[in-house]
């Protein structure tokens, strides 16, 4: 059975920490490099429910996509929710390791996993990493569908293939429009609109789209938008990452047991559809 340090070396080879954005906080949050690892849990968010899940499973290592502390802290007292997570993990000998923007930019990365979940064929990164001569790493992915779909049908596919959340999937655009090419970006993708427009795709699948960037995108071209819950767009990476570590474990005869958290940690818990006509966009020509 490997020591934590050996497993972390393997994870750092998959998602080199130096490829993370400068503002990011990736790497090991807690854990003894000498402790043996037999069970690993993968999840999107290092929240209390996931820490408790790691303890219940008897995991020695929790790997999450989102950082616990994005900025420095002067306290890990259990009176704060993050401090409580730290206490829970350390008390039960669970290490925590984060792969965030280094996993976004990797090959395969978070958006490859999203594309795979949606049954899309990746053709290129949306924002290529100039340091990758193979042209496979970078932010977001440009993809093709095997067969064109209407936007309405494509939206249904996204909703059906991603794990269910209260938010569901929002679609902007003509439901009859044909979707052949798609840009995807797991997580908050409304900073990438310039690249999406330059790619000339029919639709953009991401999360956390705000009113103004979305409205501007709709007013300036035919680009359709598909907005899913942030957690749901990144969850496919959890499966991908666990499979990657399984393969490494097999190669090294480590005998690791990897687990995938199915706990929905998207913060939104309910969705109420507006029913009054005043809350809906009127068809053109109708009074509003
Ligand atoms: Zn995210």
Image: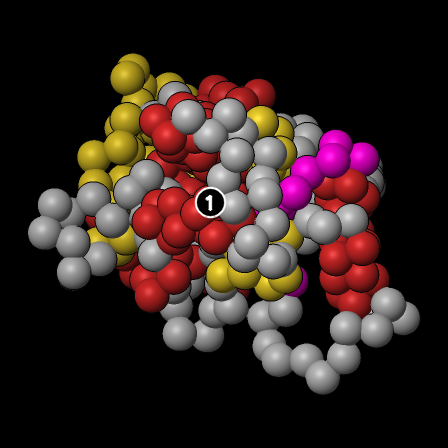
Give the x, y percent position of residue 45. Answer: 65, 50
* For residue 19, side relative to residue 254 (left or right): left
Give the x, y percent position of residue 251. Answer: 34, 27
Q: Residue at x 42, y 26 (%)?
A: 253
Is residue 61 inside the magenta stretch?
A: yes
Farthest left residue? 133
Q: On screen, 83 above or below 94?
A: below
Q: Which residue is mark 1?
A: 7
Which residue is more in the foreground, 41 or 267? 41
What stretch of residues is rendered in magenta?
56-68
Farthest top residue? 147
Give the x, y percent position of residue 10. Answer: 38, 45
Q: Residue at x 59, y 43 (%)?
A: 36
For the image, the number of numbered tags is 1
Find out if the beta carbon at label 1 lies less than 8 Å from the nearest ligand 1 atom: no
Residue 266 makes an appearance in the image: no
Determine which quarter of the picture holds residue 31. Answer: bottom right
Q: How was the colour assigned to the protein in this rendering?
A: secondary structure
Residue 257 makes an appearance in the image: yes
Is residue 249 inside the magenta stretch?
A: no
Which residue is more in the foreground, 143 or 65? 65
Farthest bottom residue? 74
Which residue is more in the foreground, 218 or 190? 190
* For residue 14, side relative to residue 287 (left or right): left
Q: Residue at x 52, y 46 (%)?
A: 3
Determine which quarter of the picture holds residue 37. Answer: top right
Give the x, y percent position of residue 206. Answer: 47, 45
Q: Residues within 10 Å of mark 1 (few under 14, many from 20)?
A: many
Q: Residue at x 22, y 57 (%)?
A: 129
Which residue is more in the foreground, 208 or 281? 208
Q: Secondary structure at mark 1?
A: helix
């Amino acid at each position: 059975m490997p020591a934590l340090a050996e497993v972390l070396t393997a994870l750092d080879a998959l998602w080199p920490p130096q490829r993370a954005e400068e503002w990011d906080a990736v790497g090991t949050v807690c854990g003894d490099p000498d402790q043996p690892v037999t069970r690993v849990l993968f999840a999107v968010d290092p929240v209390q429910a996931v820490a408790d899940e790691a303890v219940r499973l008897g995991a020695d290592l929790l790997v999450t996509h989102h950082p616990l502390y994005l900025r420095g802290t002067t306290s890990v007292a259990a009176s704060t929710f993050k401090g409580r997570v730290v206490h829970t993990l350390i008390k039960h000998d669970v290490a925590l390791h984060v792969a965030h923007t280094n996993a976004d930019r990797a090959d395969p990365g978070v958006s490859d996993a999203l594309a795979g979940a949606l049954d899309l064929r990746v053709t290129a990164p949306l924002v290529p990493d100039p340091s990758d001569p193979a042209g496979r790493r970078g932010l977001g992915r440009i993809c093709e569908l095997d067969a064109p779909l209407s936007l309405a049908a494509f939206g249904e596919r996204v909703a059906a293939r991603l794990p269910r959340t209260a938010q569901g999937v929002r679609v902007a655009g003509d439901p009859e429009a044909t979707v052949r090419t798609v840009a995807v970006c797991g997580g908050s993708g409304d900073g990438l609109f310039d690249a999406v427009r330059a790619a000339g795709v029919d639709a953009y699948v991401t999360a956390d789209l705000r009113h103004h960037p979305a409205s501007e995108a709709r007013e300036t071209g035919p680009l359709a938008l598909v907005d899913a819950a942030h957690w749901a767009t990144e969850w496919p990476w959890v499966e991908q990452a666990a499979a990657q570590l399984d393969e490494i474990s097999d190669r090294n005869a480590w005998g690791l047991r990897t687990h995938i958290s199915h706990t929905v940690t998207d913060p939104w818990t309910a969705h109420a559809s507006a029913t009054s006509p005043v809350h809906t966009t009127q068809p053109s020509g109708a009074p509003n």
